[in-house]
Amino acid sequence: MKSPFLRHVVVAVTFLFLTEISLADQLPAPTGKVVLIVTGNIDKTNVDDTAQFDIEMLENFPVTTFKTSNDWVEGITEFTGVRVSELLQSVGASSYSFRALALDRYHFDVSGIDFDKIPAIIAYKKNGKFMRVRELGPLWIMFPFDEYPETDTEQHRNASVWQLAEIKVK
Amino acid sequence: MKTARLTTLLTIFFAFMCVLQFYLIANNLDKTRAQLSDRKSAGEVNSLIQVDRNLDHFIFAITEYIHASKAGADTEKAVSKYQSDFDIFWASTSIIEQYFPENNERQAVFIESLEEVKEFLDTNDPFIFGDNPLSVADADRIYEESKYISDLYHKLGLGYFVALSEFNDQINSSTDRIYWAFYFFAIMLLCTGSFSAYSLVMANKKANALVVQSEKNQQKLTQLVNELRSGRLENKAKDSFIAAASHDLRQPLHALGLFLGALERHVQPAGRTVMEKAQQSSAALTKLLSSLLDLSRLDAGVVKVSEKDFPVAGLLSTLEQEFQSTAKERDMALVFDISNDLVRTDRILLGRILRNLIENALTHSKGSVLSVSSKSDKDSVLITVSDNGRGIPQSKHSHIFSEYYQIGNPERDRSKGLGIGLSIVYRLSELLGLELDFSSDVDSGCTFTLNIPLGVPMNLTQNDPLYNDASQATATGQVIAVIEDEIDIREGMEIMLSSKGYPTIATESADTMINQLLKEGIVPDLLITDYRLRDNNTGDEAIEKVFAALGTVLPAIIITGDTSPNRVKEASQSGYALLHKPVEPADLLAVIDDLLKQKDQALAACEAGAMR
């Protein structure tokens, strides 16, 4: 590396490469109606300091589906959505501790739940259909209560925020 | 045994109570837990608050819209706002449906209210999400209806508040119950524990007591086994057998003696020898039975000691005469060395001791010389009975005073006696408080030494009637009444007493005696009665009867054939002179003589007193 030229080339290539990566890593901007805004301690953003998602963006994540019963809907319901862990990782959240805010101004501080282990989702479909606001949609944090009996606690129930609108990562 | 059972029962009871309490606690805990986990109240109330808030937001959005449209401003934002809030309210209402209260009454109200809410939602849905924004009139109407719905929710909230309070009360009371059960359980446990500890201590004590008891029993058992080995148990059985048997022997023997005494006069010189032999045999038999009786009387503890001061010489010389002939028969020289000392003891019983010792030496010693000596030693008199016979080995010294023990008589020749002589000696000397020493060794003879307290000359009584020769007594023509239910003995007594010069009236019962005496107008001088009479009457009862009938008190003699200690005691308690069957005629006459003399003296004294 004695040649200054070579050095420049390397630097330039490296810079270019880094830039490309960071460009590729940037979240795409939402095109449809924004349904979820992720704020707080996150690395990746698309609108100002926030990461905003429309339904289509959410559907682009790997899809997770499970059936479970819960306290709010009679019988067993099938939920489809994005794993909480995947969504948070996609925005480079520093932890799984966050405040979930809902349209009805309800909020709950979620912490101490291992979302790597428990495949909780931000559901956007109930029984294969998108949910209206009056059906507790459009997004609903849902735990696989039946499959993971350890989630049968008040904390998990409280963390099952419906009409989810915003996630504030701590 | 009883306390042990009680202890067990109580422990079981306590254990049962503990289990019951435990069950109650567990049950209450379960119930409470079920109540708590079933509880939706917190969630319900929260949802109600949410619903109310959401409704408020909707009402606010409608109001804003009304203001905006009245002001003619842009209403687009206000429309999307009330649309969104309408949906949010709808959603929260759908959540509320999940929380049906359990109470039926409230459930009805709840369902009714929800129906109205739903109707509100369904009716207004088309308006809210209509193609055009709401008309002001519709908005006003919806505003009014919303207010009404809000009131409904407030009522529901109040219901929940009441329900929640009730629920809290329930939880509190069941918590209280759990506490009570827990405390009771703890107390029960404490009681059971302390009771068990107490029982344990008691059981331990009992066990100790049992150990002590068992040691005692073992000792007793050992003693019994030893007794069994040494034959004492056998002897005890023998004792009771002999006591029973001698009673039956006594009656005929008594009669035999009386008959022989009566017969003596009528025997021709040619028959004298045979007569004497017969009398000797009878006497020997009487003696054997007497010694058995002595033993049973000693056992009964009814032998009365009357201590008197008397010269020992008189007694010893009587004994010398008594045993001279026997000694001659046995080829033994009888040497008496008599001092002139006074002794203080019971003369009759001392005589019996010495007789037994002398007899024993004559029968068993196989020696050539038997010496009896008396000498004073400080404040006591030592009477020694010693022989030069084969002696008794040291090892057997401890046995010689036990009953039925005969060293040189394994074949148990009854002509050598029963082996109770020395045991009587031992008991009598104990009774009199006399020290009895014994020394002997093989081939060096035996020496018995009696240590008797020295007598005081002033108290000297002369002419002890029992040991004066009774056969010498002279009849004075005094009348003797005899009550005896056995005909043989009655007749024997009558003949014997008559032959001695006493006019005798003999009957079988007190009643016949009274009849006869009253009929003939005779008052007897002396009354003799058997102790056991017909129809369960006793001698002393008979005496009292006769005394009562005659209106006077007479000297009386009771003759008893009972050797059983209790009967002897009973008879001797009556206070009259008591003789035991078989009675040698000489003994009987001596007692009669004595009593009559006493009566005369008393009479004389009375007369003297009367004269004065």
Image (tube, coloured by chain):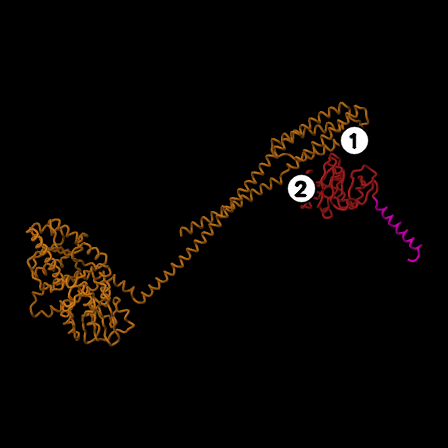
Chain colours: A red, B orange
Find residue B608 and report its horizontal and vertical position in percent. 7, 53
Find residue B28 and report its horizontal and vertical position in percent. 56, 42
Q: Which of B315 and B408 is in front in this view?
A: B315
Q: In this view, does B39 lie above or below B609?
A: above
Badge 1 amino acid? Ser
Mark 2 Cα-neighbour bin, 10 Å: few <14, some 14–19, many ≥20: few
Element under disc 1? helix
How many marks can you see?
Answer: 2
| Displayed quadrant of residue B216 | bottom left
Find residue A26 and report its horizontal and vertical position in percent. 84, 45
Badge 2 amino acid? Glu
Q: How far apart are marks 2 and 1 (CA)?
A: 34 Å
Residue carrying label 2: A154
Q: What stretch is highlighted in magenta?
A: A1-26
Residue carrying label 1: B80
Find residue B607 and report its horizontal and vertical position in percent. 7, 53
Element under disc 2? helix
Residue A2 shown in magenta: yes
Q: Left or right of B208: which side holds B176?
A: right
